[in-house]
Amino acid sequence: MFLGIDVSKKTLDAALLNSSEGAREATRKSRHKIFANTPRGHQQMLEWLAQNEVAQVHACLEATGTYGQGIACALYEAGHKVSLVNPMLIRAFGQSQLVRTKTDKADAQLIARFCAMHQPAAWTPPTPEMAQLQALVRRLEALDEMRVMEENRLESGVACEAVGASLREHIVYLQAQIETTRRQIKDHIDNNPTLKGQRDLLLSIPGIGEITASLLLSEVNVAQFESARQVAAFAGLVPRIRQSGTSVRGRCRLSKAGSSRLRKGLYFPALTALRFNPLIRALGLRLTAKDKSKMLILGAAMRKLLHIAFGVLKSGRPFDPDFLAQNI
């Protein structure tokens, strides 16, 4: 049995398909129900599955944010298989199926059909330590974005002094919250031996500092990846080539079909690594000699830096240019 869930802030549209039926017949006979996106609603969905005599279901939902975390954890803890899928894959699947209807019910059915056809990989929830770190790191990101917005408003000029005073006061408050959150992140990592050891490994890499190390630890679960290439694909840092016949020769670009947080967080560290990291500096020089563009070189540096980070975490060894050059 396959369960497609269309997640919104307040509701969960669920479509239950029987894998023994054909795609068209399964969609026509799918069982559909709407639940509240609350702990009580999650329990009601589990009871609904039990009423339909479903011992174990493969549930699939889009990885669109925090709204789906609750039901994903509830299903996982109840012994069901759960997959979080990139929304772009669902959208492309719908286009391939010539889907014309766009409703929550139709979306849930589409997700269930995608799950039945493609059998996406199972999702494992983060440990409590990882979940707390991720929450703190994302809070720090949000605070920093708010501070930059307020500073831009102040620098653009304000006609009312009261507004200017309010902006300055808010900036001071946000800066204090940023410093507090940074201390909380550092204390959380220091108090967890595993995270502390991984953080120290990442800090051995030229180009990676405390903030980048915290981001990588919060967003990348090394145990879920078998290779550095998989991590790069997860971050959307793999190249996308557009060529066809003799006439179409599009420029090679990053796929960007992955975590925008990782790409954003690796931008400035990659610039630093191009200067001070011997492996990445050598890569930059080779690409420069081939007359590659600056953005292509930077994208390659971001990908290489992520490869190195995965290598030190997977091996448990600090940064060693000679060892990594042979194993990445």
Image (cartoon, rainbow, N blue to C red):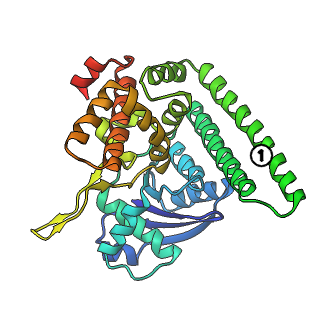
Nearer the observer, 168 or 93: 168
Q: Residue at x 40, y 60 (%)?
A: 2
Q: In what quadrant of the picture does the N terminus appear?
A: bottom left
Q: Quadrant of residue 42?
A: bottom right
Which residue is the extreme one toward the bottom? 100
Q: Residue at x 52, y 28 (%)?
A: 209
Give coordinates of residue 4: x percent, y percent: 45, 63
Q: Is residue 258 above or below residue 223?
A: below
Q: Is residue 53 above or below residue 301?
A: below
- Left or right of 209 in this view: 172: right
Q: Residue at x 58, y 57 (%)?
A: 47
Nearer the observer, 268 or 265: 268
- Left or right of 187 in this view: 313: left
- Element at badge 1? helix
Give coordinates of residue 28: x percent, y percent: 39, 78
Q: Residues within 10 Å of mark 1 (few under 14, many from 20)?
A: some
Q: Residue at x 45, y 40 (%)?
A: 266
Nearer the observer, 249 or 41: 249
Location of mark 1 (residue): 171
Give coordinates of residue 285: x percent, y percent: 26, 35
- Left or right of 197 in this view: 306: left
Q: In what quadrant of the picture does the C terminus appear?
A: top left
Total labels: the figure holds 1
Q: Quadrant of residue 297?
A: top left
User: What type is the residue that disc 1 sits on?
Assistant: Ile
Give coordinates of residue 74: x percent, y percent: 57, 48
Does residue 17 show up? no
Does residue 236 show up? yes
Q: Is residue 326 above or below residue 139?
A: above
